[in-house]
Image: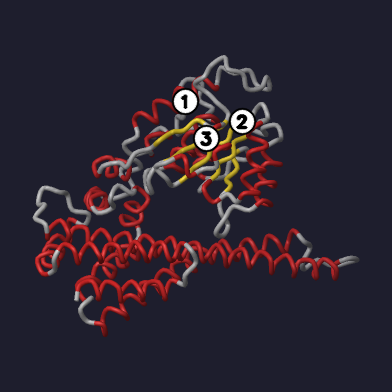
Amino acid sequence: MPGVFDRLAGQAEAVAELTAAATAARLRVPGQGWDESDARMVHAWLFTGPPGSGRSVAAMAFAAALQCEDPEVVGCGECRACHTVLAGTHADVHLLAPQGVNILLKDVKETIHRAASRPGTGRWQIVVVEEADRLTEQSGNALLKVVEEPPSRTVFLLCSPTTDPMDIMVTLRSRSRNVALRQPNAAAVEQALLVNGEIDPDMARWAASVSSGHVGRARWLATDEATRERREVVLKLPMVMHNPSRAFPLADQLVKTAEQEAIARNTESDEREVEELRTALGAGGTGKGTAAAGRGASGAVKELERAQKSRRTRSTRDSLDLALVDLAGFYRDALMASIGASDVSAVHADKAGEAARLGGHYPAASILKAIEAVQDCRRAIEVNVKPRFAVSAMVGAIRAALS
């Protein structure tokens, strides 16, 4: 059974630092606060790095190492604590992530309240904040207050999809130790996919070679046929861009696929959340007060459904953004072919022939404008332009650039 840090791809320096910190944490006397007797372990950490570098994986692996029950191995990967942390079911590890576009104040307050109590089964109460750059000013200030005066047995692990920690509010950043993760190479990604022995080696090698160092993307490509099919659709688009009767419908299909994936990925959890909320509020019960409980449940369910809709919107954008990254990568390969940079590794090695044909047909300046159009589309979707409008405008801009 691999240790918890074996899940990280190509991050030897970060693993060494986190292992040393988890080892030092075992020497601390519970309940005596945060002193500076051993600087290896601090109460707040900030994991930064480019998309796919493994920020959340690093944070959860570190959380597992801190809770690990093995007396000799830090982060053994075999004990109950390691298993439950990595599965997301450990009672003393709390995940704070955007339910919609941002992390809201009410979610921060609820998490902080739970994390301020004494650990129930583990050594620590641990708060993992995914996409910490999505904290609003109010929610960020609420988190800052407790990070400034942390409970003696609470650790905060913040993750942000950036290569620059300056993207995090300065006061939170100044109170956290930064762990900078790098973009792993294809060999490291392949090794990470093979850790549990669940992925075919040939599939792992191919997925690693076309994922641009994005471990999560490589895993989806290796394990999900729908993701592989979507990639094929995306990479057809540049080859039919000259034909509007094919290009615009294909672009519209990308958006529809992203929306369908968001619904499919969230439907089960959405239904479970609604049912759990109704039960918690007494819906379906009998006796005095059930009518009032039913009315209260109705309002709470509507609020939950609004939050779920926001989450599906975020999921749709994330799925579509991955498709646009693939598209930009194809045009990048075409650009390299256009300027004769044969020594540069291709993003989509399995589509090198198509990219070379495109690069031989259009001048480099035009292909560069196509890449800019894709990036403009990504930015437009991020600021809430409707995906269909943004993608349609992108197709129009690329066609104009290549005409």
Q: Residues within 10 Å of mark 2 (few under 14, many from 20)?
A: many
Q: Nearer the viewer, residue 229 or 312?
A: 312
Q: Nearer the viewer, residue 148 or 350?
A: 148
Q: CA distance from mark 3 to mark 1?
A: 11 Å
Q: In the depicted view, which residue is nearer to us: 336 or 34?
A: 336
Relative to residue 296, is residue 82 drawn left or right?
left
- Residue holding disc 1: 74
Q: Which residue is at the far top?
A: 37
Amino acid type of the residue that numbered disc 2 sits on in the rendered structure: Trp
The residue at 56%/61% (across/down) is: 269
Viewer-nearest of discs 3 and 1 = 3
Picture quadrant of residue 48? top left
What residue did someone put label 3 on?
63
Residue 232, how many percent across, how many down?
26, 67
Q: Residue at position x 34%, y 30% from top?
A: 12
Secondary structure beneath disc 2? loop
Give the CA distance from mark 1 to mark 2.
14 Å
